[in-house]
Image (cartoon, helix red, strand yellow):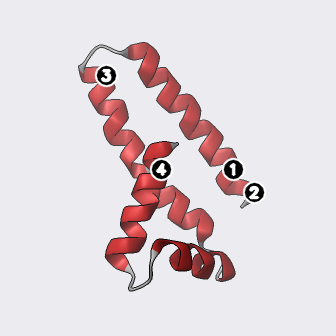
């Protein structure tokens, strides 16, 4: 879930003129917060791939579990 936060932070800082906190508030007002969380979750795929290459299947399963939890959270945000 930390990678999602980092990904969301990077997306808001790179693609908007606003700071992170202001960007989150604006996205929430426009009902786009779930979309930002989803875009931030793309970094989880990179982490998952790296963990598989390092033969860390148990950690990769944890990334998948976190992704499922994030999906459920995004549905209700």
Residue 65 in the image: state x and y as whole percent: 57, 30
- Between 69 and 3, the residue placed more toward the observer is 3
Residue 33 in the image: state x and y as whole percent: 60, 68
Residue 9 in the image: state x and y as whole percent: 43, 63
How far apart are the two marked residues, 3 and 2, measured between alpha carbons? 30 Å
Q: Residue furthest bottom?
A: 17
Viewer-nearest of discs 4 and 1: 4
Which of marks 1 and 4 precedes in the sequence?
A: 4
Proximity of marks 4 and 1: CB atoms separated by less than 8 Å: no
Q: Is residue 56 above or below residue 18?
A: above
Residue shown at the point (62%, 77%) measured from the top left: 25
Which of marks 1 and 3 precedes in the sequence?
A: 3
Proximity of marks 3 and 1: CB atoms separated by less than 8 Å: no
Residue 10 in the image: state x and y as whole percent: 36, 63
In this figure, which residue is indicated by the disc labeled 2? 76
In this figure, which residue is indicated by the disc labeled 3? 52
Which of marks 3 and 4 precedes in the sequence?
A: 4
Proximity of marks 4 and 3: CB atoms separated by less than 8 Å: no
Which image quadrant for residue 28?
bottom right
Proximity of marks 1 and 2: CB atoms separated by less than 8 Å: yes
Residue shown at the point (57%, 73%) measured from the top left: 24
SS of the residue under disc 1: helix
Q: Residues within 10 Å of mark 4 (few under 14, many from 20)?
A: many
Which of marks 4 and 2 precedes in the sequence?
A: 4
How far apart are the two marked residues, 1 and 2, measured between alpha carbons? 5 Å
Q: Is residue 7 above or below residue 18?
A: above
Which numbered circle lies on residue 73?
1
Which numbered circle lies on residue 4?
4
SS of the residue under disc 2: helix
Residue shown at the point (52%, 42%) measured from the top left: 1
Residue shown at the point (37%, 47%) measured from the top left: 43
């Amino acid at each position: 879930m930390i990678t999602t936060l980092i990904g969301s932070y990077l997306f808001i800082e790179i693609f908007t003129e606003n700071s992170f906190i202001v960007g989150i508030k604006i996205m929430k007002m426009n009902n786009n917060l779930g979309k930002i969380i989803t875009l931030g979750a793309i970094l989880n795929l990179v982490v998952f791939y790296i963990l598989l290459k390092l033969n860390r299947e148990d950690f990769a399963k944890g990334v998948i579990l976190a992704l499922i939890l994030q999906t459920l959270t995004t549905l209700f945000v």
